[in-house]
Amino acid sequence: MTVREVLFTTLLLFATTGLAAIGDGDKFDFLPVPGEFCNSASDQMQRDLFKHYPDDEGIINLYANYLGLCQLVHDGSITEQAASVLWLEQRNSLIEKRKK
Protein backbone atom coordinates (compact mmCIF):
# COMPACT_ATOMS: atom_id res chain seq x y z
CA MET A 1 0.00 0.00 0.00
CA THR A 2 1.39 3.40 -0.95
CA VAL A 3 1.61 6.36 1.40
CA ARG A 4 -1.16 8.10 -0.55
CA GLU A 5 -3.47 5.08 -0.18
CA VAL A 6 -2.75 4.85 3.54
CA LEU A 7 -3.42 8.58 3.98
CA PHE A 8 -6.65 8.39 1.99
CA THR A 9 -7.87 5.34 3.91
CA THR A 10 -7.01 6.98 7.23
CA LEU A 11 -8.81 10.19 6.32
CA LEU A 12 -11.80 8.23 5.08
CA LEU A 13 -11.97 6.22 8.29
CA PHE A 14 -11.49 9.34 10.40
CA ALA A 15 -14.26 11.14 8.54
CA THR A 16 -16.72 8.29 8.95
CA THR A 17 -16.19 8.19 12.70
CA GLY A 18 -16.73 11.94 13.13
CA LEU A 19 -19.89 13.93 12.78
CA ALA A 20 -21.82 13.17 9.64
CA ALA A 21 -23.79 16.39 9.71
CA ILE A 22 -22.68 19.94 9.12
CA GLY A 23 -24.49 22.83 10.79
CA ASP A 24 -27.88 23.28 12.44
CA GLY A 25 -28.58 19.60 13.14
CA ASP A 26 -29.10 18.69 9.49
CA LYS A 27 -28.68 15.08 8.47
CA PHE A 28 -26.69 15.58 5.28
CA ASP A 29 -23.74 13.24 4.88
CA PHE A 30 -21.47 14.00 1.95
CA LEU A 31 -18.61 11.62 2.51
CA PRO A 32 -17.29 10.81 -0.96
CA VAL A 33 -17.10 7.17 -2.00
CA PRO A 34 -13.74 6.35 -3.60
CA GLY A 35 -14.09 6.51 -7.37
CA GLU A 36 -17.36 8.44 -7.14
CA PHE A 37 -16.38 11.90 -5.96
CA CYS A 38 -17.15 14.00 -9.03
CA ASN A 39 -20.30 12.51 -10.50
CA SER A 40 -23.92 13.56 -10.97
CA ALA A 41 -25.06 12.08 -7.62
CA SER A 42 -22.39 13.88 -5.59
CA ASP A 43 -22.95 17.05 -7.65
CA GLN A 44 -26.64 16.95 -6.71
CA MET A 45 -25.88 16.37 -3.03
CA GLN A 46 -23.56 19.37 -3.00
CA ARG A 47 -26.15 21.57 -4.74
CA ASP A 48 -28.80 20.43 -2.24
CA LEU A 49 -26.59 21.31 0.72
CA PHE A 50 -25.82 24.71 -0.80
CA LYS A 51 -29.52 25.37 -1.50
CA HIS A 52 -30.41 24.36 2.06
CA TYR A 53 -27.82 26.77 3.54
CA PRO A 54 -27.38 29.54 0.91
CA ASP A 55 -26.09 32.11 3.43
CA ASP A 56 -23.72 29.81 5.34
CA GLU A 57 -20.15 30.92 4.57
CA GLY A 58 -18.70 27.53 5.49
CA ILE A 59 -21.08 25.70 3.16
CA ILE A 60 -20.46 28.23 0.38
CA ASN A 61 -16.70 27.66 0.70
CA LEU A 62 -17.16 23.89 0.81
CA TYR A 63 -19.32 23.97 -2.32
CA ALA A 64 -16.91 26.27 -4.17
CA ASN A 65 -14.03 23.99 -3.23
CA TYR A 66 -15.99 20.97 -4.50
CA LEU A 67 -16.72 22.68 -7.83
CA GLY A 68 -13.10 23.74 -8.29
CA LEU A 69 -11.69 20.35 -7.37
CA CYS A 70 -14.06 18.57 -9.75
CA GLN A 71 -13.09 20.97 -12.53
CA LEU A 72 -9.44 20.07 -11.93
CA VAL A 73 -10.39 16.37 -12.04
CA HIS A 74 -12.32 16.82 -15.29
CA ASP A 75 -9.37 18.77 -16.77
CA GLY A 76 -7.03 15.91 -15.82
CA SER A 77 -4.95 18.15 -13.54
CA ILE A 78 -5.48 16.04 -10.41
CA THR A 79 -6.88 12.61 -9.65
CA GLU A 80 -10.35 12.09 -8.25
CA GLN A 81 -8.76 10.49 -5.19
CA ALA A 82 -6.57 13.55 -4.56
CA ALA A 83 -9.60 15.82 -4.97
CA SER A 84 -11.65 13.81 -2.50
CA VAL A 85 -8.84 13.89 0.08
CA LEU A 86 -8.51 17.67 -0.24
CA TRP A 87 -12.28 18.09 0.02
CA LEU A 88 -12.43 15.83 3.08
CA GLU A 89 -9.78 17.93 4.78
CA GLN A 90 -11.89 21.08 4.29
CA ARG A 91 -15.10 19.28 5.34
CA ASN A 92 -13.48 17.89 8.49
CA SER A 93 -12.07 21.31 9.34
CA LEU A 94 -15.55 22.82 9.06
CA ILE A 95 -17.00 20.08 11.26
CA GLU A 96 -14.30 20.61 13.90
CA LYS A 97 -14.92 24.36 13.95
CA ARG A 98 -18.63 23.76 14.45
CA LYS A 99 -18.06 21.33 17.32
CA LYS A 100 -16.56 24.13 19.41
Image (spheres, rainbow, N blue to C red):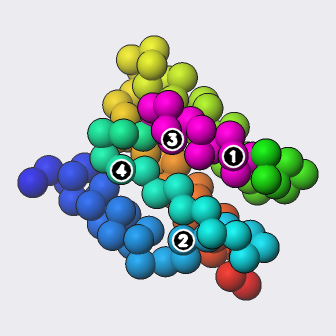
Quadrant (top left, top right, bottom left, bottom right) of the C terminus: bottom right
Between the C-alphas of marks 1 and 3, the distance is: 10 Å
Q: Residue furthest top?
A: 75
Which amino acid lies under the numbered mark 2 shown in the image of this protein? Answer: Ala
Query: Horizontally, is 24 left or right of 86 in the view?
Result: right
Kindly identify which residue carries mark 3: 42
Q: CA distance from mark 2 to mark 3?
A: 15 Å
Helix, strand, or loop for circle 2?
A: loop
Label 3 – label 4 distance at C-alpha = 9 Å
Sequence-first disc among 1 and 3: 3
* Residue 17 at x, y percent in the picture: 41, 78
Is 4 on the left-hand or right-hand side of 30?
left
> Considering only vertical position in the picture, is 36 above or below 58?
above
Q: Residue at x 59, y 46 (%)?
A: 45
In the displayed structure, 88 sits above or below 11; it is above
Q: Amino acid at mark 3?
A: Ser
User: Amino acid type of disc 1?
Assistant: Asp
Q: Earlier in the sequence, mark 1 or mark 4?
A: 4
* The residue positioned farthest toward the bottom in the image shown: 100
Q: Earlier in the sequence, mark 1 or mark 2?
A: 2
Label 4 amino acid? Answer: Val
How many residues crowd mark 1 within 10 Å: few (<14), some (14–19), many (20+)?
few
In the rendered structure, find residue 33 and report the number of the disc placed on it. Answer: 4
Q: CA distance from mark 4 to mark 2?
A: 14 Å
Q: Position of residue 84 (x, y in %)?
A: 43, 45
Disc 2 designates what residue? 20
Q: Residue 45: within the magenta?
A: yes
Magenta span: 38-50
